[in-house]
Amino acid sequence: MQHRHLTHEQYTLAAIDDIIARGKRRDWAELRQAALVDRSLFEKVLRVCQAYVADPYAQRYHFWKQYAERHLA
């Protein structure tokens, strides 16, 4: 996914936030696959999602938070 404000393709916190917020199904699948290979990405996903847990309408972040928690358990 091309990030509108990032000039790299690494999974930084900002890139993960952008993927969750604006990404399409393919982008999510790529993030999922990368996280299954490198489990530290799930920890980054949790860090990103933590900022949105108070918002009940941030369903994308709630989904990813639960998904990451299940894989880290």
Image: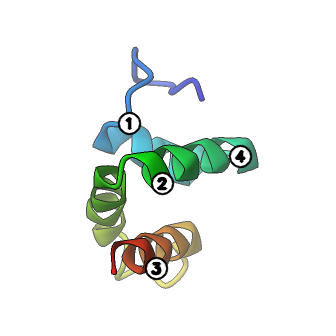
Between the C-alphas of marks 3 and 4, the distance is 19 Å
Between the C-alphas of marks 3 and 1, the distance is 19 Å
Q: Earlier in the sequence, mark 2 or mark 3?
A: 2
Residue 66's mark? 3
Count neighbours of disc 1 (C-alpha within 10 A) and say few if under 14, some if 14 to 19, many if 20 or more: some
Residue depicted at x 44% and y 22%: 9
Residue furthest toward the top? 7
Q: Which residue is mark 1?
A: 11
Instruction: Indicate the amino acid at tag 1.
Output: Tyr
Between the C-alphas of marks 2 and 3, the distance is 15 Å
Residue depicted at x 64% and y 42%: 27
Quarter the C terminus occupies: bottom left
**Closer to the camera, 70 or 4?**
70
Instruction: Indicate the amino acid at tag 2.
Output: Leu
Q: Earlier in the sequence, mark 3 or mark 1?
A: 1
Instruction: Indicate the amino acid at tag 4.
Output: Lys
Q: Quadrant of residue 12?
A: top left
Q: Which residue is mark 2?
A: 36
Q: Is residue 22 above or below residue 59?
A: above
